[in-house]
């Protein structure tokens, strides 16, 4: 079984920082891209940032220059450093990993359970 477990969410004032972590565990052969999505109340889930196994990154325009995604391949862990937080960053943040459980298995997107980030004004 594969699990993605997020941590690091919480309540922070506008202008503050938080660091999210997401560790993938279980029967994992290989992980391609990892990423973070977020979903605000009443809105669709949207991509925040992603990172390939080689370290190439992609960010949504709304977080460029404020958020940094990184990963530790040895630990199967992805991080999201969030600086200069704004009230509009308030959402449930989900991590995702595109991974295969064996050498011959197809790659499949796995999701974490989500962690709440609330930014007060």
Image (cartoon, rainbow, N blue to C red):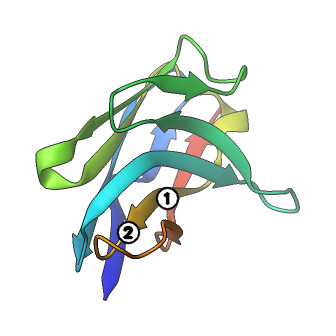
Rounded to the nearest whole Å, what is the CA distance between mark 2 and mark 1?
13 Å
The quarter of the displayed image where residue 100 is located: bottom left
Residue that extends furthest to the right in the rendered view of this protein: 42
Q: Is residue 116 above or below residue 60?
A: below
Residue 64, percent across and down?
60, 16
User: Circle 2 sits in a helix, a strand or a loop, which is it?
Assistant: strand
The crowd level at tag 2 (other Cα within 10 Å; few <14, some 14-19, many 20+) is many
Q: Residue at x 61, y 50 (%)?
A: 37
In which quadrant is the N terminus drawn? bottom left
Residue 55, percent across and down?
35, 27
Q: Nearer the viewer, residue 112 or 100?
A: 100
Q: Residue at x 28, y 38 (%)?
A: 71
Q: Residue at x 46, y 69 (%)?
A: 112
The crowd level at tag 1 (other Cα within 10 Å; few <14, some 14-19, many 20+) is many
Mark 2 or 1: the one toward you: 2
- The residue wearing badge 2 is 100
Residue that extends furthest to the left in the rendered view of this protein: 74
Q: Nearer the viewer, residue 54 or 80?
A: 54
Specify the label residue 37 is tagged with.
Answer: none
Residue 39, percent across and down?
71, 56
Residue that extends furthest to the top in the rendered view of this protein: 65
User: Circle 1 sits in a helix, a strand or a loop, which is it?
Assistant: strand
81 horizontally vs 62: left or right: left
- The residue wearing badge 1 is 96
38 horizontally vs 36: left or right: right
Whether tag 2 and tag 1 are in contact, CB under 8 A, the answer is no
The quarter of the displayed image where residue 51 is located: top left
The quarter of the displayed image where residue 54 is located: top left
72 horizontally vs 22: left or right: left
């Amino acid at each position: 079984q594969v699990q993605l477990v997020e941590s690091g969410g919480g309540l922070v004032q506008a202008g503050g920082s938080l660091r999210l972590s997401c560790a993938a565990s279980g029967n994992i052969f290989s992980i391609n891209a990892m990423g973070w999505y977020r979903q605000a109340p009443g809105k669709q889930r949207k991509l925040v940032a992603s990172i390939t196994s080689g370290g190439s990154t992609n960010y949504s325009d709304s977080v460029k220059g404020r958020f940094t995604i990184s990963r530790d391949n040895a630990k199967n862990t992805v991080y999201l450093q969030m600086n200069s937080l704004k009230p509009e960053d308030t959402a449930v943040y989900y991590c995702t990993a595109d991974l295969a459980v064996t050498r011959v298995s197809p790659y499949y997107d796995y999701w974490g359970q989500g962690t709440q980030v609330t930014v007060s004004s």
